[in-house]
Image (cartoon, coloured by chain):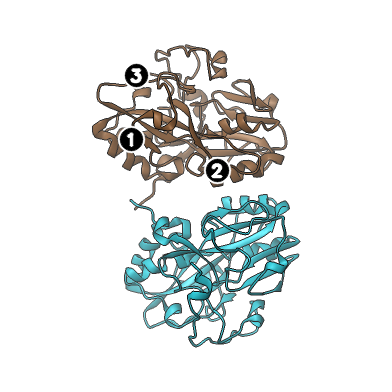
Chain colours: A cyan, B brown
Amino acid sequence: MGHRRCHGVRRGRVRRRRAGADPAARDREPEAAVVTTSGLAPGYAQANLIAVPRDWAYDVLLFAQRNPKPCPLLDVTDAGATTTELKPDADLRTHIPRYRVWHDGELTHAPTDVTEYWRDDLVSFLIGCSFTFETALREAGVPLRHVDQGRNVAMYLTNRECRPAERMHGPLVVSMRMIPESLVDTAVRTSGLMPAVHGAPVHVGDPGELGIKDLESPDFGDPVEPEPGDVPVFWACGVTPQAALMASRPPFAITHAPGQMFITDVPDKAYLNQP
Amino acid sequence: MGHRRCHGVRRGRVRRRRAGADPAARDREPEAAVVTTSGLAPGYAQANLIAVPRDWAYDVLLFAQRNPKPCPLLDVTDAGATTTELKPDADLRTHIPRYRVWHDGELTHAPTDVTEYWRDDLVSFLIGCSFTFETALREAGVPLRHVDQGRNVAMYLTNRECRPAERMHGPLVVSMRMIPESLVDTAVRTSGLMPAVHGAPVHVGDPGELGIKDLESPDFGDPVEPEPGDVPVFWACGVTPQAALMASRPPFAITHAPGQMFITDVPDKAYLNQP
């Protein structure tokens, strides 16, 4: 399918992030690079990636099983595999627009190709992404502010701890969308039909209840401008394992860069619960 | 709640199994013991148990992740734990009416209490059970032949291989219910709303398509008498990990005896997908 090079490049106005929580911002090429895969390849599911050495695979798998809202597993590869059944013709090391390479819980590199970093003992976890229900939101009449503004979705660390698993622990990360108040119910219902890609929101309204101090300063991605009458709506996010990497400090890991996802060949409707 | 000793004993006519595939039949006390927990504690979810040494836990967890239809995980304990959040006041070693103890893939004991066999490195997997949607079937007007006949549900090995995971591999096991033809759609729809407890059937009709030669000779549980106009309907079954134990031969494992489940405190409706 060759999504990666075919689906074009977003050239929206990208507000430069303040120096801060997102160390990969320094690697971002502000105008020419893909800012986010949100809005690309509509109709196809997108996935988060976390690849860890086999020695840490049980910890990550159990963490995902115990925290299905942020970590709904779509596929887990055998150690060393460089493909996933979600898109068999794609190389896990090159298909994502931008990666993150982690050593001892520190983000060390943010390349567009991780072939040189790959190891034969890496187990890859593909985790559902809320971008997958954005087509359904749009079809239900819910505007997508971040897409319309040419920005990445805004993501935040919260004060909610995930259920730990062996050595893996850390806070819940959420993605936020500004939704017109009259359409919040529609957004809840529409996303709620797709639990494999995070399902219904975990919170609507006051960011303070999640411990988020300033919506203008997301921990990952870009701030998004609200329109009058918008309400912030928060979904569990597949960046949660990256927060757990920072807290749990495994010796090595590779992930996608937040908002720059693995685009699959699986139709988004495959993850729609048919009542 | 004390389900185990409170929920009474089924005394229906139990046809003795032919000598054959179910080696635990020799341990069964034909009249006095619990034949099955099907029909007991209506309104509460029931669960399959497989407990393996920590060294095999990744294999089992990945096997379950890759085979969610037969192995929907409801909880995974820490190594050595003797309780589950599904029923915090129950001891995993005594709450199930009958267990199976396995050495090198061979069934060696079928006791009612596994305290003496327990090990500090055992990780327990609680897997959804189709008994959980039987109340919903009954409420939808679908008769439960095995309950009415005082028998265990009939379970069969099939010719469908599960997706292997590390050292774990084996065939899909199914439970079978005889359903009046006019109610098959209702049974499909009703169970389909509960994917965490196996969801919709994997097959309706000809047993030969699953490689089942004789419905009268189930591999686990009891044969069930059809009524005129009944059609056999097959659901993925949480005994599948036991077939994988036989095929994969881990050094040690403890499971429930087929049909004799861990009765939880979780309402069955907690696993109902709300459309």
Q: Which residue is drawn at 69% across and 41% down?
A: B79
Work out whether B192 lies above or below A3.
above
- Classify residue B230 as left or right of residue B2: left
Mark 2 residue crowding within 10 angstroms, few (<14) / some (14–19) / many (20+): some
Chain-order first, disc 3 or disc 2: 2
Mark 3 residue crowding within 10 angstroms, few (<14) / some (14–19) / many (20+): some
Specify whether disc 3 shares its chain with disc 1: yes
Q: What's the amino acid at mark 1?
A: Leu
Pointer 1 residue: B137
Chain-order first, disc 3 or disc 1: 1
Pointer 2 residue: B163
Pointer 3 residue: B225
Q: How far apart are marks 3 and 1 (CA)?
A: 18 Å
* Residue B76 visible in the snapshot: no
Chain letter behind tag 2: B
Q: Dividing the picture into quarters, in which one does residue B252 lie?
A: top right
Q: What's the amino acid at mark 2?
A: Arg
Q: Which residue is at the front of the view, A93 or B77?
A: A93
